[in-house]
Image (cartoon, rainbow, N blue to C red):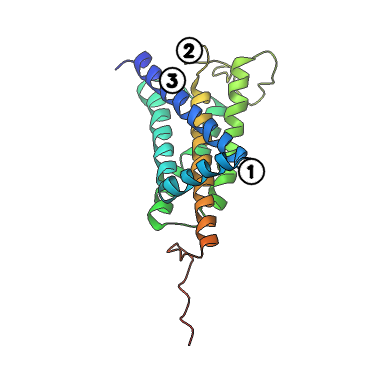
Amino acid sequence: MNLNTVSTFFALGALMIGAAVIVVAAIAVLARFSEGAARIWESIVISAGPQALWLGWVMAVIATLGSLYYSEVADLVPCTLCWYQRIAMYPWAIVLGIMAWNRERFAARYTLPVVIIGFGISTYHYLLQRFPDALPEAACSATVPCSAAYIWKFDLVSIPFMAGVSFAAICTTLLIHRAWLARLEEDGEPRTMVGTEPEEPSR
């Protein structure tokens, strides 16, 4: 497959995942005010919560492989902001998998700060491409400007757009996982998670 075909595939995937993230986020917010939305949110947490870390890991792996395709196969030179986003994304392609395997109960606490920073960088990078004359580009080199969009699909999707969707999706899976753990605590169910020791039976 050529660059155009791969980019179209990635762009469509980013749009679908982004739409799903927006829908889930809207349901989570509306759940505070609507019983119907609360029931839908509860079903999402119950169904996706146990596998949420694995879903986040898969998203990190796809984002990592996608960025490597663009730089190592398609020979698109990453700009400075691209490298910042890679720094915020690449570790989770390994660490989230380890957390999911070990059923780490503090995954959101460790992961969310970096993911949110990565999302912020992706958002700024995308806005810089969309409005190159309105934002400063001090961090970028003249030879590889951050405002240059190698990929621009559907007059909307660029590489930082895809990265931002990936960060948002990982953030969503982490929040679902945290909500699932909170629900287990409320129900008084035991959690076989890292860092949780079984209680001694009372005598």
Q: Is residue 89 left or right of residue 74?
A: right
Q: Quadrant of residue 59?
A: top left
Identity, as a three-letter code, of the amino acid under mark 3: Leu
Percent coordinates x, y for residue 197 in the rendering? 47, 71
For the point 43% across and 53% down, the residue is: 99
Quadrant for the N terminus in the image: top left
**Residues marked 1 and 2 touching at CB (< 8 Å):** no
Secondary structure beneath dot 3 equals loop
Amino acid type indicated by mark 1: Arg
Q: Residue 154: which disc?
A: 2
Question: Which residue is depicted at the point 61% across and 40% down?
Answer: 34
In percent of width and height, residue 171 lies at: 53, 41
Q: Is residue 72 above or below residue 43?
A: above
Q: Of discs 3 and 1, which sits in the foreground?
A: 1
Residue 163 appearing in the image: no
Which mark's residue is nearer the viewer, 2 or 3?
A: 2
Reading the image, the residue beneath label 3 is 76
Helix, strand or loop under label 2: loop
Quarter where residue 115 is shown: top right
Q: Residue at x 43, y 20 (%)?
A: 76
Residue wearing tag 1: 32
Residue drawn at x 59%, y 43% is: 35
Q: Nearer the viewer, mark 1 or mark 2?
A: 1
Specify few, some or many for label 2: CA neighbours under 10 Å numbering under 14, 14-19, or 20 or more. few
Disc sitting over residue 184 in the figure:
none
Task: Give the CA distance from mark 2 to mark 3.
Answer: 20 Å
